[in-house]
Amino acid sequence: MKKLLRLFFPLSLRVRFLLATAAVVLVLSLAYGMVALIGYSVSFDKTTFRLLRGESNLFYTLAKWENNKLHVELPENIDKQSPTMTLIYDENGQLLWAQRDVPWLMKMIQPDWLKSNGFHEIEADVNDTSLLLSGDHSIQQQLQEVREDDDDAEMTHSVAVNVYPATSRMPKLTIVVVDTIPVELKSSYMVWSWFIYVLSANLLLVIPLLWVAAWWSLRPIEALAKEVRELEEHNRELLNPATTRELTSLVRNLNRLLKSERERYDKYRTTLTDLTHSLKTPLAVLQSTLRLSA
C-alpha cells in the first residue's frame, strides 16, 4: 500500500493544478446550473399559473347563474384545445359544477385552497392520471411506458385556484383549473433530466482543455527541472537565464550559487595542486637521505 501511495504522492504541480481547477469548475457549474434550474422552475410555475388562470377566466365568462343554479355553456372540442379540467365551487366550498366526473381528483382538492388565489400541485399515480387522460392516445402511450418502467410512479398535476368576488349577476365563485397533462410528460421537465448529462459533458470537455492549459503553463518549470537533471549528470554548467519572470530570480540565484561553488572548487583544486608541488622537494630529499643511509 505504501509503495502504491508513493507512486501518486506527493502530487505533481500539473496534477494539483488539474484537480484544483476541475473542482472549481465543478462547483461553479453546479452553482450556476442550480440557480438556472431554480429560476427556470419558478418561471415555469408562473407561466403555468398564468395559462391556467386564462382558462379560469374563460370558464367564468361562459358561466351563467340562473334560478340559483350555475350553468356553463361549453364550446365543442374544448378538451382538445386546452387539456385541462375545471371545477367551480361556491363561497362555502361546495362543488357547483365539474367539467367531468373524476371522483379521485375532487377528493384531492383541499378546502384551504379554495379560500384564496394560489398555485398548487397534486400527486397522482399513473393509473389515476391515465383515467384523467383517457381520450388522449399519445399521452396514454407515454403513460404506458412510464408504467412499464415503474408501476408505482407518481405524476404531478398543476392546479390553479382563482377566487372571483360576487357581482350583480354572479355570486362569489372559486374556480379550480387542473392541468391534466402531468409535469413529468412535458418537454420542460426534461431540463432537469438532462442537467446531469450537461454537467458530465461540461467536465469531459473542460478537463482536456485544462490539461492543455496546464501543459502550456508549466512548460517553464518542466524545462527548469530538465536543466537541473542535466546539471546533476554534469552535462550542463549553468541554467538558462531566458525564462519566465517568476523564475528569473530563482535561476539567477541558482546560477550564482553554481558559479560560487565552481570557483570554490577551482580554488581548492589549485591549493591542493600547489601543496602537492611544495611537498615534492622535501619528499625527494627524504628519499635520497634514506637511500644514502641504507
Image (cartoon, helix red, strand yellow):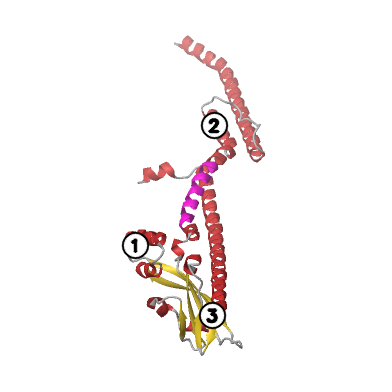
Task: For the C terminus, give its image quadrant.
Answer: top left
| Amino acid type for the residue under numbered disc 1 | Arg
The label shown at residue 147 is 1
The local secondary structure at tag 1 comes to helix
Residue that badge 2 annotates: 226
Between discs 3 and 1, the one toward the N terminus:
3
| Amino acid type for the residue under numbered disc 2 | Lys
The local secondary structure at tag 3 comes to strand
Residue that badge 3 annotates: 63
Mark pair 3, 1: CA separation: 38 Å
**Which region is colored magenta?**
193-210
Mark pair 2, 3: CA separation: 87 Å
- Which residue is outermost to the top? 292
Whether residue 202 is in magenta: the answer is yes
Q: Residue shown at 54%/65% (left/top)?
A: 44
Whether residue 25 is in magenta: the answer is no
The answer to which of 149 and 16 lies nearer the viewer is: 149
The local secondary structure at tag 2 comes to helix
Principal secondary structure, stretch drawn in magenta: helix
Between discs 1 and 2, the one toward the N terminus:
1
